[in-house]
Image (cartoon, helix red, strand yellow):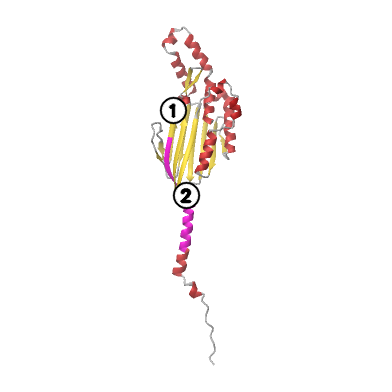
Amino acid sequence: MNFSKLGKMLMWLIRPLGLLNRNIGHSGNKLFATRKPLLWLVVLTSLLLSGCVKYDVGVNFNHSNSGELVQHIKLGERLTSFSGDYIYAWLDSIETRTRKLEGKVRRISQEEVIVTIPFSNGQELQTKFNEFFNSHNNQKVAATTSETDSELPKIESNLLLFQNNFLLVVRNRLIYDLDLRSLSLIASKGNVLADTGAILDLEFSLNTPWGAKNIQLTENAVEPEKQGNQLLWRLQPGELNHIEVVFWLPSPLGIGALLIVLFIWGGLYLRYTFMPDPRIQFAPQPTATESQ
């Protein structure tokens, strides 16, 4: 999965700090013992890696039959300086998956990329979104994973979109669940290494023509920020993030059908109201006969 690779990347990056943690824990230095070296290690790591990954996912609707999935990924210089080769390979894999879904990739720099994947209806959005973030193309590789891969945090992502057509408008109910509980603390062999809340900055946004209404039915529902017709959720690493929202979209097919009906009705009304009856206008004229 795409987010799981982020977890693997961060685990690989801060793994050397685990050795420091064990060395401090077994040392007889009273100064470190009294000051809780593990806590100091977490704080130090968070300061060094703060703001390493900024990942924004946006769903933009124009109407019920047009929209795009936009992702903006920006990596911090600290992260690329530590693990540049792995980072660039990960970004290349994102480009490959995007093109398979008929999307476009704009590379701002080596550390920043913008991905745009179009969709023509709600079902296509659901399919492309889940396929992108739940890629199962590496099953053969997964069968031969190393010990490092076996420690990879398991992240579940699932988006559902239910649509009801009311001729001129379409009612949409979007449900998105992202389970980031495995990223609460990145650990290696029982040693806590870093708080991912200080490393990952994850956002999910929904932009619609008429705005949307957030539905908060569960305790783990994330409260959004409203910016015009856009709702923005700041996802929390280490928690189960639940998003549920209802919004309405105009239906071009329904509106087009209504316009055709009105056009035909208007033509008939004008024809039989302001113009003579064609039965009289084009009636055959009787022929005049000469009287004998």
Question: The N terminus lies in which quarter of the figure?
Answer: top right
Looking at the rendering, the stretch of residues picked out in magenta corresponds to 243-266
Horizontal side of residue 235 vs 5, given as left or right: left
* Of 33 and 162, the residue lying toward us: 162
Q: Is residue 25 magenta?
A: no
Q: Classify residue 91 by image quadrant.
A: top right
Q: Is residue 263 magenta?
A: yes
Magenta stretch secondary structure, dominant: helix
- Asked whether residue 78 appears in the rendered view, the answer is no
Residue that appears at 45% across and 65% down = 269
Disc 2: which residue: 251
- In the rendered image, residue 210, in percent from the top left (x then y), is placed at 42, 45
* Of 65 and 147, the residue lying toward us: 147
Q: Residue 62 bears which disc, if any?
A: none
Residue 284 in the image: above or below residue 105? below
Q: How many marks?
A: 2
Q: Residue 239 bears which disc, if any?
A: 1
- Asked whether residue 162 appears in the rendered view, the answer is yes
Dot 2 alpha-carbon crowd within 10 angstroms: few under 14, some 14 to 19, many 20 or more: some
Q: Earlier in the sequence, mark 2 or mark 1?
A: 1
Residue 166 in the image: above or below residue 285? above
Q: Classify residue 82 by image quadrant.
A: top right
- In the rendered image, residue 235, in percent from the top left (x then y), is placed at 44, 31
Look at the numbered discs 2 and 1 and tell me whether their residues touch, using CB distance below 8 Å. Answer: no
Residue that appears at 40% across and 35% down = 225
